[in-house]
């Protein structure tokens, strides 16, 4: 069976890129799948450097290129990785339409953004069209229970699967065993964007530093807000406490995970961030916003600390608590790693997608090119 994975550039700083890379490298043979042929098709602007004219040309040509790829590679299933923001949605509606015209099966995986009932709130025609788009897919994949339930309620006649993200289990952070050392080492890992809560994080660090605490924050990533963030660091007088490392991959990223004690992600909205899973797998304590599927992974005071988006005071309190209570810091680090080992392994991830690919392909062969109505179900891991 041939599956086309539509997503951003494999080297882009993006959780969706991480997801596509994991699918391409998944241990399919260990879950009994030796006949899967997965190919990547790049969509979106992440990982590209292009002019306005180049972007327009790409937007016009890309659906045609997708259609050609589906035909020439004899693709059976298009696995379309999207998110519920307007830019990605309208772009990917076109890709879905191309696949349907060519009578290919489509799996629509939602990587964060708005909940479905909020996406076009107050716009009846757009909401009705959105439901038709979801029904045009053979299956919808959600990352966490809140999204899974929301899609089930929004389109009860569409098959909705719950397949959480996964992570390759690395060695535990060297910082797990040194929680008694003075100071607190914080790590942000991801796209440099205001929606990630980075400006609130800088304000919180400034408060902690002014109170006399020894704080070090490494910001690893790149993005459109980098210059503005650097200027804010200067304005707050946070040198040398805050350092920008640029995007880190492979061994360089693992070195950061070995260094850090606390992973901070005070995002305004999220799906299920891969950076969170990677940090927890290394035994780093997460201090994260209770948004999207994050509460499915992090129990407050069980595997980390949850905060409210935009609340600098809650960030300050959470980080100060970990700085003051080193026994809590050590306990949460161990619990965070155990959580990932228990629920977010790569083999379970591969098994869930192998089952989904086979089911969608089987539907195609037994009921024609598109089923009229399919049942709702979940691959929930509990």
Image (cartoon, rainbow, N blue to C red):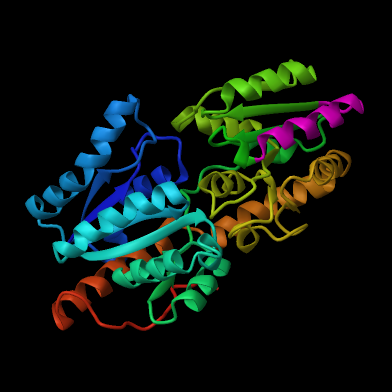
- Percent coordinates x, y for residue 141 in the rendering: 41, 65
Along the horizontal axis of the image, is 284 left or right of 362? right
Which of the 4 image quadrants contains residue 62?
top left
- Percent coordinates x, y for residue 238 in the rendering: 76, 19
Query: Where 372 sits versus 115, above or below?
Result: below
The answer to whether any part of residue 358 appears in the image is: yes
Which residues make up the magenta segment? 197-214
Q: Residue at x 72, y 39 (%)?
A: 177
Q: Residue at x 64, y 25 (%)?
A: 229
Which of the 4 image quadrants contains residue 108?
bottom left
Residue 344 lies in magenta, yes or no? no
Which of the 4 image quadrants contains residue 298?
bottom right
Q: Nearer the viewer, residue 82 or 94?
A: 94
- Quadrant holding the C terminus: bottom right
- Quadrant holding the N terminus: bottom left
- Percent coordinates x, y for residue 6 in the rendering: 29, 50
């Amino acid at each position: 069976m041939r599956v086309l994975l539509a997503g951003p550039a494999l080297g882009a700083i993006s959780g969706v890129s991480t997801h596509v890379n994991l699918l391409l490298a998944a241990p399919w043979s260990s879950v009994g799948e030796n006949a899967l042929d997965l190919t990547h098709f790049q969509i979106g602007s992440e990982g590209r450097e292009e002019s306005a004219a180049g972007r327009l040309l790409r937007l016009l040509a890309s659906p045609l290129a997708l259609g050609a790829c589906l035909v020439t590679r004899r693709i059976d299933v298009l696995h379309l990785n999207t998110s519920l923001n307007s830019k990605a949605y309208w772009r990917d509606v076109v890709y879905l339409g191309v696949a349907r015209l060519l009578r290919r099966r489509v799996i629509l995986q939602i990587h964060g953004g708005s909940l479905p009932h909020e996406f076009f709130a107050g716009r009846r025609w757009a909401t009705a069209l959105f439901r038709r788009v979801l029904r045009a897919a053979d299956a919808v994949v959600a990352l966490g229970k809140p999204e899974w339930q929301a899609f089930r309620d929004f389109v009860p006649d569409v098959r909705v699967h719950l397949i959480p993200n996964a992570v390759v289990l690395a060695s535990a952070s060297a910082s797990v065993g040194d929680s008694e050392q003075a100071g607190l080492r914080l790590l942000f890992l991801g796209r440099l964007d205001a929606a990630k809560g980075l400006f609130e994080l800088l304000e919180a660090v400034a408060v902690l530093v002014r109170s006399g605490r020894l704080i070090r924050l490494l910001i690893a990533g790149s993005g459109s807000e980098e210059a503005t963030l650097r200027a804010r660091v200067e304005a707050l007088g946070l040198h040398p406490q805050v350092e920008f490392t640029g995007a880190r991959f492979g061994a360089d990223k693992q070195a950061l995970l070995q260094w850090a004690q606390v992973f901070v992600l005070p995002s305004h909205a999220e799906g299920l961030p891969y950076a969170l899973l990677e940090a927890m797998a290394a035994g780093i304590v997460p201090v994260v916003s209770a948004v999207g599927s994050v509460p499915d992974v992090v129990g407050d005071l069980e595997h980390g600390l949850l905060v409210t988006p935009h609340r600098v005071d809650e960030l300050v309190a959470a980080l100060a608590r970990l700085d003051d209570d080193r026994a809590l810091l050590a306990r949460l680090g161990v619990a965070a790693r155990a959580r990932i080992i228990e629920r977010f392994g790569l083999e379970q991830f591969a098994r869930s997608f192998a089952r989904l690919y086979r089911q969608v392909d089987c539907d195609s062969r037994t009921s024609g090119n598109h089923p009229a109505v399919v049942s709702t179900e979940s691959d929930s891991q509990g």
